[in-house]
Image: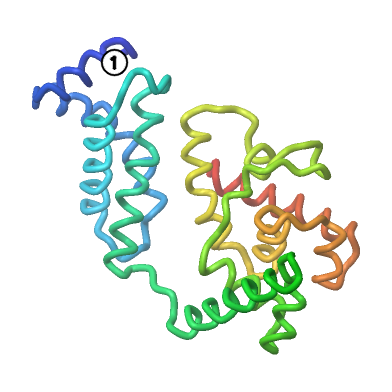
Amino acid sequence: MIDVETTKELILQAQSGDADAKETLLKENVPLIKSIVKRYKGKNIEYDDLMQLGALGLVKAINNFNPDFGVRLSTYAVPMITGEIKRFIRDDGAIKVSRALKTMSYKIGQFVEEYQQNYAKEPEISVIAKQFDIDEQEVVYILDSSKMPVSIYEKNDEDNGKSLIDRLSDSSSEEDLLDKLTLKDCIQKLPQREKMLIVLRYYKDKTQSEIAKILGVSQVQVSRLESKIISKLKKQLTG
């Protein structure tokens, strides 16, 4: 394994057109690419194609890297490798959202916008469900499918000021960064009720008491279920 200073020298050489330096950096970071690629198995894309996409992302990271970023190349490369793979999956149509889901998502979006204009606040999940005569869980699913906000990084008073990311890991290693980038995929694979709880808790900023009312259970049950889900996510991220 090459050290940090040697890596910086190789990056400068690669950015100056040295093909051998770029090849050395690619070989050195193959384990990183593989660790990211394994998260996308089962997406109807050949493993070799995923590796090539990962390598393309790494090359982009090499070309754009600047020592002033204050991070190592491998850390900087993670989102670029992941982004290259996700972009291909999206553009290739391997992950599709049904037309009906898109239509309902659009209608809900318009309703939310009008509601905000009239009442100066966002409507509750229950209000949206009543408006469209659908279950509250279905509302959460539709909102979750259209986009997932980034409030997993927002602090939560009921968790001693910790965000979902904080609860999953308190360190800042490169592997933790990879876990953060793939957390969304793990959440998507949760059973509907568990995903609903996490989305409401960490993406919609609902309290455990508010979620308890939505799910029709006690706050204690929500707390226990939340702890169980967090434990499950930890295993998925570290497994």
Q: What residue is rendered at 66% in x and 37% in y?
A: 166
Q: Nearer the viewer, residue 4 or 80?
A: 80
Q: Disc 1 residue type? A: Ile
Q: Nearer the viewer, residue 57 or 223?
A: 57
Q: How is the image coloured?
A: rainbow
111 lies left or right of 12: right
Q: Quadrant of the N terminus?
A: top left
Image-quadrant location for residue 98:
bottom left
Residue 31 to residue 186: above or below: above
Q: What residue is rendered at 67% in x and 43% in y?
A: 154
Residue 181 to residue 24: above or below: below
**Residue 228 point in image, percent of width and height:** 74, 53
**Residue 148 point in image, percent of width and height:** 55, 59
Figure disc tally: 1
Q: Can you name the residue that lies furthest to the top here?
A: 5
**Residue 9 point in image, percent of width and height:** 22, 13
Crowd class of label 1 (few under 14; some 14 to 19; many from 20; radius 10 Å): few
59 lies left or right of 120: left
Q: What residue is rendered at 48% in x and 85% in y?
A: 100
Q: Can you name the residue that lies furthest to the bottom here?
A: 133
Q: Dot 1 corresponds to which residue?
A: 2
Give the SS element for disc 1. Answer: loop
Image-quadrant location for residue 138:
bottom right
Residue 80 to residue 50: above or below: above
**Residue 231 point in image, percent of width and height:** 69, 47
Q: Nearer the viewer, residue 117 or 144?
A: 117
211 lies left or right of 115: right
Q: What residue is rendered at 29% in x and 64% in y?
A: 91
Q: Nearer the viewer, residue 69 or 27?
A: 69
